[in-house]
Image (tube, helix red, strand yellow):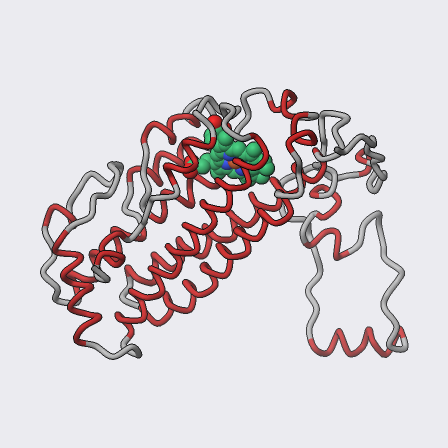
Amino acid sequence: MPKFEPFMPKIVDPEGVEASTAARPMNHSNDESRAATATETGGSPMIDFEGTSNPYIDYQSIDLLLSLQHPRSEGYDEMCFFVMGQVKELLFRGLHFELVNAQMQIRNDEVGNALQILSRSTAFVKYLADTWDVLSTITTEGFNQFRDHLGTASGQLSFMYRHVEFVLGNKSRRLAEAHRNVPHVWPAMLEALETPSLCDDVNALLARQGMSIDSAVLERDWSLPYEANLSVENAWRHIFETTSANDEMHRLGQALVSLDQEFSIYRWRHFTTVERIIGYKPGTGGSAGVGWLEHVTKHHFFPEIWATSN
Ligand code: HEM
């Protein structure tokens, strides 16, 4: 399955697409102009536009976005894999934006703002986990019809995913260095590796709140993998035991562990989807495949908060 061949509907003529990555010029509207337009159209949607595009297309360069789906095989399932890969990259992008901003709010002691952002971040991770519902419909036979066309391409090389892992605190110089030959990606990757993560900023916040946090946590080589620390665990234990569930720091601890838990579910669902599709064959990216994914399911970004339940 599937034995049938894909039929690829033609949606956009690539010849007409403006391929620049820059934002396209657009007009603004306001309450008055929208009311005037509705009067002019008699309440029906506009259908006449100047030039060779329309404002919906231009706002998000939709014609360009929808010209980037190029399955490389005759395998029916490749289009699903291709589109879901792109969808996931966009979701990683959205999640990363939220996490960086949560980190900035924490750095400015704006815990309430960070809580608001973290609730959206967790919604993003849940949404990402649900992408495995669609990808799980790819069968072993369907995957094998296009797998060879992936060459050595692997999700492990997703720089956007790596940024998500790094902002949360799961640093790895080795995995970052897979991007050192890509000049338009490497500087931001290196910076993310070598600067504090959200986890590091949360620990600095605990210290500013008067908790006794080891200096080895507060001044460290940010590029090294984070190691759980007892002073951080004691700080969270103190917060959970002495404050009400409405307290901002209490809610922050719970919000971080919820995010962490959803991320574990995302990893677990990747692992089981892959086990179902390729079993124990090696991955395309040089790893031992499913064994590698199983190993990473055990990772926690905020190990000390998990430890407070022991
Ligand atoms: C549905 C078919 C899929 C299979 C069979 C699969 C398989 C694998 C395997 C075996 C690995 C381990 C590394 C390697 O050697 O390649 C891996 C890692 C990874 N895959 Fe997938 N994958 C699939 C879909 C996806 C999709 C659609 C994405 C989205 C971008 C993705 C993102 C990743 C990421 C980010 C990693 C690295 C994980 C980490 O560093 O912890 N995978 N995948």
Q: 160 or 279: which is nearer to us?
A: 279
Q: 109 or 39: which is nearer to us?
A: 109
**Relative to 18, is 196 on the left or the right?**
left
- Quarter of the figure that contains the C terminus: bottom left
Q: 176 or 273: which is nearer to us?
A: 273
Residue 20, image x, y percentages: 66, 38
Q: In which quadrant of the rendered view does residue 44 lie?
A: bottom right
Q: In which quadrant of the rendered view does residue 75 lie?
A: top right
**Relative to 214, is 105 on the left or the right?**
right
Residue 307, image x, y percentages: 22, 56
The answer to whether residue 255 is visible is yes
Residue drawn at 45 percent across, 46 percent down:
268
Residue drawn at 56 percent across, 43 percent down:
89
Residue 116, image x, y percentages: 42, 69
Residue 184, image x, y percentages: 49, 31
The answer to whether residue 158 is visible is no
- Quarter of the figure that contains the N terminus: top right
Residue drawn at 35 percent across, 49 percent down:
168
Picture layout, residue 187 above or below residue 245: above
Residue drawn at 33 percent across, 42 percent down:
170
Picture layout, residue 296 above or below residue 214: above
**Relative to 40, is 31 on the left or the right?**
left
Picture layout, residue 71 above or below residue 87: above
